[in-house]
Image (cartoon, grey):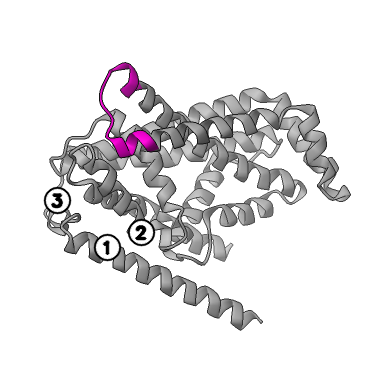
Amino acid sequence: MTIQIFSRKSAATIIKLIVAAALLYWLISSGRLDFKVILSLKFSYSLLFAFLLMLLFLFLMAVRWWWLLRSQNIILPLLRIIELLFISGFLTTFLPGQVSGEVVRGFYITQDSPNFKAAAISSVLVDRALGLYALLFFGVLAIFYFHVSHESLPLSIFHISFFIILITLFATLMGVMVWIPQTQRLILKIIPNRFKDKIMVILTNYYSKGSYLSVGFLLSIFAHASVAGSFIFLASSIQTDVTWSQVFLLKPLIIFSNYIPISPGGLGVGETVSSYFFKQFSVVNGAEIALLSRMLLIFTRLPGGILYILHKRI
């Protein structure tokens, strides 16, 4: 049975690698991705600032998770949270299709807090939810900016903008409903009795410490602003001009496309989406910018491999 599961995972990973290779080949052969642009890249202050902003993004993510854990009375050193974040990022990047970052974080954090396992896992879920919501929030802000500035949106992106707004409204509604007593009672009805008390304590902690969620959301805003800045500096490093409004609007689409489980980490998918949508704004190097951003993120995650080896020895 174990061999069969392993074989299925291996087959799925191979298929995903083939899909990624096929997408990259299509991008290159169609002229949408020019590796010469990347290979000719030289050191510049734009590249340095992009790297520093990516590090800032990872640090803010760690602070956000550390802060949410404290709302559940799980007190761990910030350095430990940074370590776990780097380890999960490394394993997600270099074991494609085998493990997800949330699973790794959930595994390690429950080991570090054995008496608060449910609360620890909830922090991982809430952390991810805040990050995605902040991403959507930036998308809506960009749409609003295009509207008030009377800048025309390409027709395809105009249609997509309605989808972003609807998803954001739905996410907002779901977030509000969780705090309504009637909704909480409904949730508790479908949860096994042995988990009800723990879930109620978790919800009460988040509800009574609303400032923790507010600060978590603000940290998400700053984190994604850092990623957007990194994206813009990467574009500048290859002599391509993109605006903040374009990045804020398109970044949610690029990041969400990376979650489509047809290639490892969205490799090839994100680049294709970036190429298509940036081209709507007459930006021809969308695929190159997305690939550079991916390569930079991978580079910043490399220390996680060392931390993973050291952790295994402890």
Give the x, y percent position of residue 141: 40, 25
- Looking at the image, tell me whether mark 2 or mark 1 is earlier in sequence order: 1
Please say whether residue 183 is one of the residues in the magenta stretch: no
Q: How far apart are marks 3 and 2 (CA)?
A: 21 Å
- 1 vs 27: above or below: below
Q: Distance between the residues labelled 1 and 3?
A: 19 Å
At label 3, counting other C-alpha atoms closer than 10 Å, the crowd grade (few under 14, some 14-19, many 20 or more) is few
State the image coordinates of residue 56 (x, y, percent, origin top left): 39, 37
Q: Earlier in the sequence, mark 1 or mark 3?
A: 1
On screen, 274 above or below 169? Answer: below
Q: Name the residue under label 3.
A: 41
> Is residue 152 in the magenta section?
yes
Rendered image quadrant of residue 203: top right
Q: Say whether residue 306 is left or right of residue 79.
A: left
Identity, as a three-letter code, of the amino acid under mark 2: Leu
Instruction: Please provide percent x and percent y for residue 29.
Output: 17, 64
Which residue: 42% across, 72% down? 15
**Residue 116 visible in image:** yes
Residue drawn at (11%, 54%) of the image: 40
Write down the residue under mark 2.
267
Expressed as whole percent of the image width and height from the top left, the position of residue 88 reads 51, 55
Three-letter code, disc 1: Leu
- Range covered by the magenta-colored residues: 145-159
- What type of secondary structure mainly makes up the magenta span? helix
| Residue neighbourhood size for the residue with mark 2, other residues' Cα within 10 Å, grouped as few (<14), some (14–19), many (≥20) | many
Q: Name the quarter where the C terminus is drawn.
A: bottom right
Q: Residue furthest right?
A: 193
**Closer to us: 107 or 33:** 33
The residue to which callout 1 is attached is: 24
